Amino acid sequence: MKAQDVKVCVLRIEGTNCEDEMVEAFRTVGARPEKVHLKQLLGQCSDGLKRSLEEYDILALPGGFSAGDYVRAGALFAARIKAAVGHDLKMFVEAGKPVLGVCNGFQVLVELGLLPAFDGTMAEQPEAALYTNDSGRFECRPSVLRNDNRGNCVFTTGIKPGALMQIPSAHGEGRLLSSDPRFLDRLETGDQVVFRYVQPDGSPAVYPWNPNGSPSDIAGICNPVGNVMGMMPHPERAVTAYTAADWTRGHRSEDGDGKQIFTAVMKYLSKR
Amino acid sequence: MAVKDRMMKRQAVYDLCDIKLSGASDEELKGISDALSLGLSLDEMKTVRDYYAREKREPTDVELQSLGQAWSEHCCYKSSKTFLKEFVFGLNRDDVLSRGDAGVMIFDDDYGYALRVESHNHPSAIEPYGGAATGIGGIVRDVICMGAQPIGLADPLCFGRPDRQGELPAGIKHPRYLMNGVVSGIRNYGNRIGVPTIAGAFYFDEAYTGNCLVNVCCLGIVKRKDLLNNFASGPGEIMILFGGRTGRDGIHGVNFASKDITATSEDDSRGAVQLGDPITKEPVIHACTELAQRHLVTGMKDLGGGGLSCVVGEMAIEKGCGADVDLEKVQLKESGLAPWEIWVSESQERMMCTCTPDKVQEILDLFALWDIIATPVGRTTDTGRTRLYWKGEKIFDMDIQFLTGGPVYRRPFNMPVPVRGPDRMPALPAADQVLITLLADPNVASKEWAIRQYDHEVRACTVTHPIVGRLNRGGPGDATVLKPVYDRWKGLAAAVGCNPWFTAADPYRGGMASIDEAYRNVVAVGAMPNAFTDCLNFGNPENPDRLGEFREAVHGLGDIARGLGIPIPSGNVSMYNQAPGGEHILPTPMIVCCGLIGDVRKAVTADLKRAGTQLFAVGDTKDEMEASLLFRIFHGTGGQVPLVDVPRLKEVSARLLKAMGEGLVLSCHDCSDGGIAVAAAEMAIGGDLGVELDVTDLPGQDLNVKLYSESCSRWLAEVDPKDADRFRKIMGDAARPIGRTGSDVFVIKGTDARIPVSKLRSAWSEPLWQVMGGRAQ
């Protein structure tokens, strides 16, 4: 499909707060993004505002503190989505349409059971959680990611395996843990690891390059099919080179590294 | 007659007292003011008594409470207004779009930017987490009621030293505890509402131990055609209260802010601290910007100090209207509030808008989508009076002019007389020790501990960051540059400036120096300063010495702003900053400067870029050592407080901006605490690069003066040797070479100092982590 036909649903509730830049990122790569409140999918609004998930080609869950994150991060938003449009969402994913969750959006996808979703589209119970950072603090800092996906994930279509990308992090709960002892193995075997934190020279990350202490430095994962991807760092904050923390020290391109992820998913859709 | 006999409970379903003022003696008037916690003086009570004599009736408690709010120092600036009028007001320029709840300046042909700073000092001294959080909430509302989208927060904070040892005065909390609470409050509120905290400052001094300062600033961006008024456009409009519910939190907050902190403030005034709720606020931001964009409202205003009692009158009076309010319609957190409590409550997250009756339903629908409580509670009239009703029964009827007029005082003040010791350069240890000590002072040391807890990048508009240089190995930045409109390259820069030590030693010069610092921070990133907003934190105005400091500092601010031709479209005054026992704070004129840069891709940062480049000192280094960091630490006395030469500042900054515009400046850093030596070391830390500092060419004899003097209007600039001639041609006599970059060692020529940059880095980056817990980058 053509870029200008790609409709993106940027879903929000109270406390979602990275939707403007998410919309802007999709606009930059030629898509047609729209901010949609969950109540619009539920029909709890005037007729003109009612929307249905199936109208869209991409679903994006932006960062923020949905519903305040006063319970577990992402838990309330996930519960509301599941109760309201759980079935529609499952259909959306099974239709192969891309779903992106960034930061709080990643936490929501894990709470929804859409990630890692080892045994199907959407697990009944969450199989993992994003825990409080090792440092115990919110960490807003630059991070460098390596594309460790071997071709499964639609959000890295065309990005070279092993490519390094400078994409900033800003979260208090980003340590991906699971009670499943085979968790990392299964992610690896299923080509579900998408991004790892590394140092700028590509060597393994230590704090603060891994800002949260995630085992195996995992920054982003996808589902077994590769169309649902969640990541803690914010690619939508790295669409232009001029928001990087060190761009005045020189930069390769006018584009920021985060833009590649949006370009990648558009490339994937262009072949559909 | 006993005071309680003058208060007669009305036989009604609501809780109301009629107060018999007629015939009250001086003592009884004072007694009534105290019994109702009105905070009104005897003279003010007499004026009130005379008003009701003219009205030929007795007041209700709701009316007296309303006066207590409206006439507080916090609301009507009764002690400060005279001086603000004399020195600061009337600084006009035609790019000031509004002087409403926030100032609004022209950003470009289509957009304006909003700016405002205010204090939340007293609540934060009692309950640091909640005080700071609600401070952010309030300042954000000031920006959104202009129709603007908030795009940045800046939080200058002052505390006692966090590593303070020894006993604390009664009722005072440890600075480390306060700092932790305040930073957590800013983090949890700012991060949750999705507005980046882009700038700030920390000032540490024993004088802030008993009364910390929490100043909060918010910037916003608004399409000029969507800019809102903060008042109704005429009679017959509907007043809609929206946002949070009304409760007993935050009652008498303005009165608390208008008196000194005491040993028992915690117990007496806890109810004056409001409770914030960022997840009510976040959708309010969306709804308000949409209301503005759809042109549905005629005016919008924040409920801040004084709550409904202030907002209703202020929204009505601007166009000479009156207002009728049905108080029972206000949605409450709990039942059983007396009408006066509803009327003066400062519960958070509340705002009011006015609209023509045909727009009400559309507005309520918009709020409903976001689950925001919104209730039409009143209407504007042509009576010029505020009238309150409880289910149709009138309980309040006052002339708005009288109510909001408020007294203005010309309180006595003493002109400050500087107390100066003999001119004495202190005995100093070896130069490397001096530099390490200065870098490790909490006033200079890295604030990374706080900066990384704040999301300074949300909205994806942050172009230059608070920490600049090598990734995760940066140094301090000067101003932060934002790119507020996604598809435009134009930038908005913002930075904080203040020097409380200069201001204490010489209020006039200190006021000027504070503006100078904010201004040069903005210039350092390549932006042209465009507007200031100020938060003036001072002591008890009833003390003539304190008021004299205030007067002279304001005098200095006014002179420099006028000289620079830069407006101050918004500001705030916080007085009564005094600890139990009477220790007053350092006079603290906190300045935020905003600047514009045509293309953010030309912005400059402070980190050294490469080896083999030349370093220049820009501006004039003079023997001005009084109140400098060096003197404060090593006990020097005498000398001069730096004096700003305003025409020279204008000239030098224009030249520097020209050089930056031509791309000649690789890095640039403001020269402030610790002088040239510290500024150069900070640039070295950010770039992870050595420097051979050689100040021989600077005028004067004393090496220590050249290295550590804190003369105003100075920068350091890094220039490629191939561009050095062109740079010097542009700068004229304003730039002098002070060395070269290279290697990984910081060398000060003329001394034995040869310090590895890694050692500078740990001296600078570790101190706050060590005190607050955690670890450096």
Image: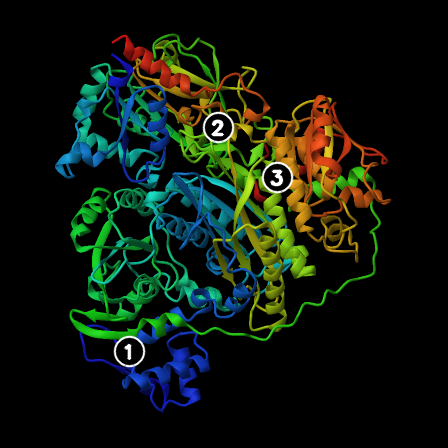
- Residue B635 in the image: state x and y as whole percent: 78, 54
Q: Between disc 3 and disc 1, whose residue precedes? A: 1
Q: Is residue A56 above or below residue B637?
A: above
Kind of residue sitting beneath label 1: Thr
Q: Amino acid at mark 3?
A: Ser
The residue depicted at 50 percent of the width and 54 percent of the height is B92
Whole-percent x, y for residue A61 in the image: 31, 28
In the image: residue B694, left or right of residue B113: right
Q: Pinpoint residue A231: horizontal percent, then vertical percent.
A: 38, 23
> Could one spot residue B750 in this view of the protein?
yes
Tag 1 residue: B60
Residue behind mark 3: B446
Measure the C-alpha gap from mark 1 to mark 2.
57 Å
Q: Of all residues shown, which one is farthest toward the left? A: A47
Subunit of mark 2?
A
Amino acid at dot 2: Thr
- Between circles 2 and 3, the one closer to the viewer is 2
Q: Secondary structure at mark 3?
A: loop
Q: Quadrant of residue A195?
A: top left
Tag 3 and tag 1 share a subunit: yes
Letter of the chain that mark 3 sits on in the rendering: B
Q: Judge whether A71 appears above or below A177 on screen.
A: below
Residue A223 or A100: which is nearer the viewer?
A100
Task: Residue at 35%, 65% (x, y): give it.
Answer: B310
Q: Chain of mark 1?
A: B
The 10 Å Cα crowd at callout 3, few under 14, some 14 to 19, many 20 or more, is: many
Q: Residues within 10 Å of mark 1 (few under 14, many from 20)?
A: many
Per the image, the residue denoted by label 2 is A243
